[in-house]
Amino acid sequence: MAAIELEGLTKDYGEVLANDDVTFEVEAGEIFGYLGPNGAGKTTTIRTLLGFISPTAGTARLLGRDVTDESELLEAKRNLGYLPDNPAFDESATGREILDLHASIKGDERSDELLELFDPPLDREVREYSHGNVRKLGLVTTFMHDPDLVVLDEPTGGLDPLMQQRFAEFLRAERDRGVTVFFSSHVLSEVRRLCDRVAIIRNGRLVAVEPVDALLDRSGKVVRLRAADPIPMAAVDLAGVHDLEGGRSEDADSATGDESEAAADAFTECTFTFTGDVNALLERLHEYRLLDLSIEEAPLEDVFMRFYGDGGGTESASALEPRAGERENAGTATEVTDDA
Ligand SMILES: Nc1ncnc2c1ncn2[C@@H]1O[C@H](COP(=O)(O)OP(=O)(O)OP(=O)(O)O)[C@@H](O)[C@H]1O
């Protein structure tokens, strides 16, 4: 039995079709990322799953139970942990009082262990908490009753890098002991670190459900480099180079005569998106004296622009391919030099 089953889920707010025929399953024991830009419809799906709002059409099942049936939903929630994007704890209560309340409602199998990991300041009132401390308290309340399934809405917002790392290790360990994790995000690096599979939603429609490796292969890297001396354009005439923007630094600009002509087909600084083999790129660049080189994940918005067009989602397999023009041009010398 899948931990989450969505079939044709639709939520129409009148002016906005926030979820439009959304269908996918989250298998028991996987970390599943629900990805999309702001306003894509992630929270709407999560709020429907939790029974906070009713679907306009379609079905949603949590741990095999229909969430539109109140008694089935209650049953499912016994084994569910939920962290909203903005946990609304009673501001006048201390962290400890909040934990006591949650323990009395859901039970407490493991708060000691969780407090050691996340360590929110329990003796302070929540109104004095920072955003990150609210999130840490939320993580303890989400996992303290040892649920089978956790639903996390943008879980790492406000956590510092050390805490994010700790959280990532914790989630992987939870997955390894059989817990199913469903979380929403618009941060690709977070998804990369954590997820087995992802669903991507855009403008309310699902555009892909796939293993995270497939998404990352598709999304590419942003490469920025700065060289001590001009690098010929031909050096980056390589499969997988897109949207190259290059130029010469001020020093190179001051060159005159023959030097200047030779530099016209060369750059000392450039930025491009790269979907090819990074080792092949590094081999090409090996012979040049680089002052700076960064290879970073493409921002999620760029991934959407590049691979899903700007006309919203589509359920067809073609949505998973680069747009036609990009596919034809990808990696050719023409594209590299024309775009530069
Ligand atoms: N109660 C509501 N009434 C009307 N429209 C709504 C309501 N809640 C959400 N929407 C709209 O539905 C769309 C999807 O919103 P949703 O909050 O589900 O997106 P999201 O992917 O979670 O975004 P974010 O990453 O910014 O939190 C948006 O256009 C939003 O403005």
Image: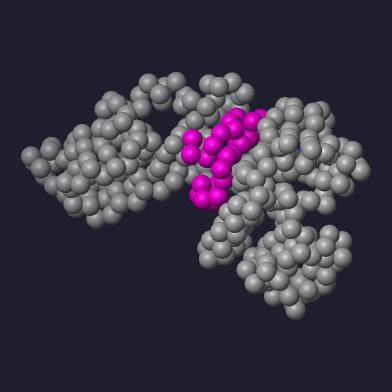
Residue 194 falls inside the magenta stretch:
yes
Seen from this angle, which residue lies furthest bottom?
A: 123
25 left or right of 97 in image: left
Please determine whether, in this image, residue 162 is positioned above or below residue 37. below
- Which residue is at a point 78% across and 35% down the rendered structure image? 60
Q: Quadrant of residue 239?
A: top left
Q: Quadrant of the N terminus?
A: top right
Picture quadrant where residue 156 is located: bottom right
Q: Position of residue 249 (x, y in %)?
A: 24, 49
Residue in the picture at 86% in, 47% down: 75
Depicted 78 relative to depicted 197: above or below = below
Q: Which residues are magenta?
A: 189-214
The tally of labels here is 0
Q: Quadrant of the C terminus?
A: top left
Magenta span contains residue 96: no
Look at the image and tell me whether residue 52 can be seen.
Answer: no
Quadrant holding ligand 1?
top right
Residue 248 percent location from the top left of the image: 23, 45
Picture quadrant where residue 326 is located: top left
Judged left or right of residue 66, residue 283 is left
* Residue placed most toward the observer, 258 or 161: 161
Depth check, front residue: 137 or 262 = 137
Which of these two is toward me, 144 or 236?
144
Q: Position of residue 313 (x, y in %)?
A: 61, 27
- Residue found at x 74% / y 33%: 6
Q: Is residue 295 above or below residue 239?
A: below
Residue 169 versus residue 120: which sits nearer the camera?
A: 169
User: Going by the image, does 335 lie left or right of 135?
Assistant: left
